[in-house]
């Protein structure tokens, strides 16, 4: 179990200490616009519980990780981008993870190349 982290950017957003453009919220997850969007839709979906990243997730976190993805699919439906979108978890600095509170990127609204860089 990872405790809430007072220094964590996304915990601070969850506490309302840093503003964010909220997109979606339920009991377990919160979603907001990425500050530096890489696609017409670029939303971050985070569990309300602080989990540093996928590497640090435990078996008890499985439902939360699934709920983040289901929130992404709901947002994609609402935004009418179901022709093609991508959910991404960057895991570790070598993959570009810069915020160590697990988050699912939802990217869509443009064609998406494969493989990603
Ligand atoms: P990652 O690099 O996978 O850890 O993703 C972190 C994401 O957080 C990046 O896409 C950033 O643009 C985004 N980000 C950083 N600060 C903020 C913020 N204050 N509000 C919204 N998104 C942010
Ligand atoms: Zn956090």
Image (spheres, rainbow, N blue to C red):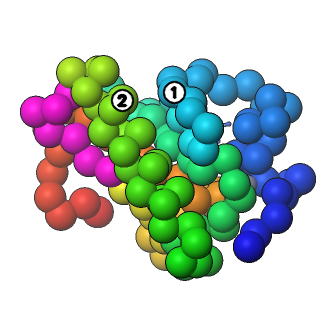
Q: Residue at x 56, y 67 (%)?
A: 61
- CB under 8 Å between discs 1 and 2: yes
Q: Nearest the camera: 96 or 57?
A: 57
Q: Dividing the picture into quarters, in which one does residue 31 lie?
A: top right
Res. 75 mark? 2
First to last magenta residue range: 81-87
86 magenta-colored: yes
Q: Position of residue 41 (x, y in %)?
A: 35, 29
Q: Which quadrant would the C terminus be assigned to in this image? A: bottom left
Q: Nearest the camera: 54 or 26?
A: 26
Ligand 2 image position (quadrant):
bottom right
Element type where label 1 sits in the image:
strand
Label 1 CA crowd tier, 10 Å (few <14, some 14–19, many 20+) = some
26 magenta-colored: no
Q: Answer with left or right where residue 84 lies relative to residue 49.
A: left
Res. 24 mark? 1
Q: Nearest the camera: 64 or 11?
A: 64
């Amino acid at each position: 179990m990872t405790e809430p982290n007072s220094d964590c950017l996304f915990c601070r957003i969850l506490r309302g200490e840093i503003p964010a453009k909220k997109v979606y919220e339920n009991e377990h997850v919160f979603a907001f616009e990425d500050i530096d969007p890489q696609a017409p839709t670029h939303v971050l979906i985070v569990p309300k519980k602080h989990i540093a990243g996928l590497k640090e997730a435990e078996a008890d976190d499985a439902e939360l990780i699934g709920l983040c993805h289901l929130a992404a699919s709901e947002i994609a439906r609402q935004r009418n981008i179901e022709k093609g979108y991508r959910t991404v978890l960057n895991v570790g600095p070598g993959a570009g993870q810069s915020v160590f509170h697990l988050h699912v990127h939802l990217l869509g609204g443009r064609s998406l190349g494969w493989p990603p860089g």
